[in-house]
Amino acid sequence: MPVSREDLERRERTVLAPYAQLSSESRGRIYKEAPPEWRTHFQRDRDRVIHSRAFRRLEYKTQVFLNGTGDHYRTRLTHTIEVAGIARNIARALQLNEDLAETIALAHDLGHSPFGHKGEHLLDRLMKDHGGFEHNRHSLRIVEEIEQKYPNFPGLNLTWEVREGLLKHNTGYDQPGEHGSFTAKNASLEAQVANLSDEIAYYSHDLDDGLEAGLLDEKKLVKEVRIWSEAAAFVRREYGDLPDEGRRYYTIRCIIDDQVKDVVHTSEQLIRKTGVASADDVRKQARPLIRYSTERRKLNLQLRKYLYRNYYYHPAVHEPNLRATRMMRDLFGYFLTRPKQIGEFSRKQIRSLGLHRAVCDYIAGMTDLYLMKEHERIFDTGAQRRA
């Protein structure tokens, strides 16, 4: 006999901790639907995210390096997949709902603009007098309004718990603010797991890409970043002299393992100390329960400062991104004066959302490559003369 949704829900009640978010206790969807037959509600959500257009576009959106800079650098999509893997591991270790943590992780960057955080900051400035732009809030709009795949409702009609996780995705980069539909002090533990998994992934893998590009130096990392020096010393003791690629890979793998272990042990102690007995107890807590230890947080801050000083604002990273965001600014102004040239769906939104928001949505949905091609098509003076 096939395994039914009811079987999977019973399995959750047997295996998961009492403070985990059970799929059978979901607060539901905006639009009523028949429940899935062989999947839980969160598994259905995961599949809807993966099949969305916004998810596919992440392949061609910047993580740190502009898309197309190199074959082995992270894109927004590969980063997302790595976050989801880490989130599943932490959720499993803490007896939380892996499906929910994975789904939030897979969806957490759906609303990212082209050209990474520099593109997001530019859109926010351009929209200063029209509600601003923040990619987590835009992720929520994508899954609630912008995706158009189903005959009976707009968006993906995801469960309340996944949408809560998107809006409450808080990291050093991400501060989406309040939203009337999600008023609890905290989100589920699964959403908190997705938050920290994002940090673990982008710091460790930004190290990898920086070394691959030759912008970071292992000898300097050993001297200035304790997380790196401790992991590198362990790899040297265990494996001796390794080829460059293997040595870097295992060092970063050790960093990720140490981060995950720290989060699991610290969070397990906090959960036990607070005595939370349900997912809603978790939401009432004044602070998140999925955390680094104090010592690990200090070490991560040291790493973060090092990456900002030596990598994120390195001319090889910073200047191409600045040139790319100037293209974004050009297109924003151009479409404001020629709204008939934005996509059909965005044009239809002008009446209800206003011109600025419709143009912002259209540009935020572009990939790096498409935006650059549009800029070339519109502003290439040679092409204009030949027309």
Image (cartoon, helix red, strand yellow):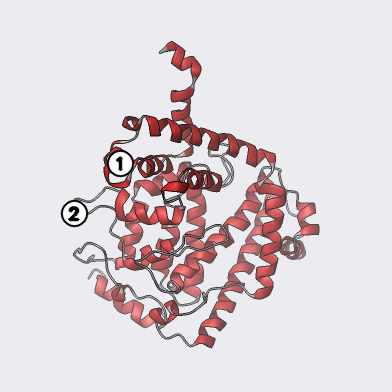
Of tags 2 and 1, which is closer to the observer?
A: 1
Horizontal side, residue 306 vs residue 284: left or right = right
Between marks 2 and 1, how big is the CA–CA gap?
22 Å
The residue drawn where x is 55% and y is 77% is 267
Q: Which label was assigned to residue 350?
A: 1
The residue drawn where x is 51% and y is 45% is 125
Horizontal side, residue 38 vs residue 204: left or right = left
Q: Quadrant of the C terminus?
A: top left
Element at label 1: helix
Please tell me which of labels 2 and 1 falls first in the chain. Answer: 2
Q: Which label was assigned to residue 152?
A: 2
The reply to whether dot 2 and dot 1 touch (C-beta < 8 Å) is no
Horizontal side, residue 204 vs residue 97: left or right = right
Q: Pinpoint residue 335: horizontal percent, then vertical percent.
A: 39, 32
Q: Residues within 10 Å of mark 2 (few under 14, many from 20)?
A: few
Q: Pinpoint residue 176: horizontal percent, then vertical percent.
A: 47, 59
Residue occupying the far front of the picture: 129
Q: Pinpoint residue 128: horizontal percent, then vertical percent.
A: 47, 48
Q: Residues within 10 Å of mark 1 (few under 14, many from 20)?
A: some
Q: Nearer the viewer, residue 88 or 295?
A: 295
Q: Visible in this render: residue 110?
A: yes
Name the amino acid type tagged 2. Answer: Asn
Q: Quadrant of the N terminus?
A: bottom left
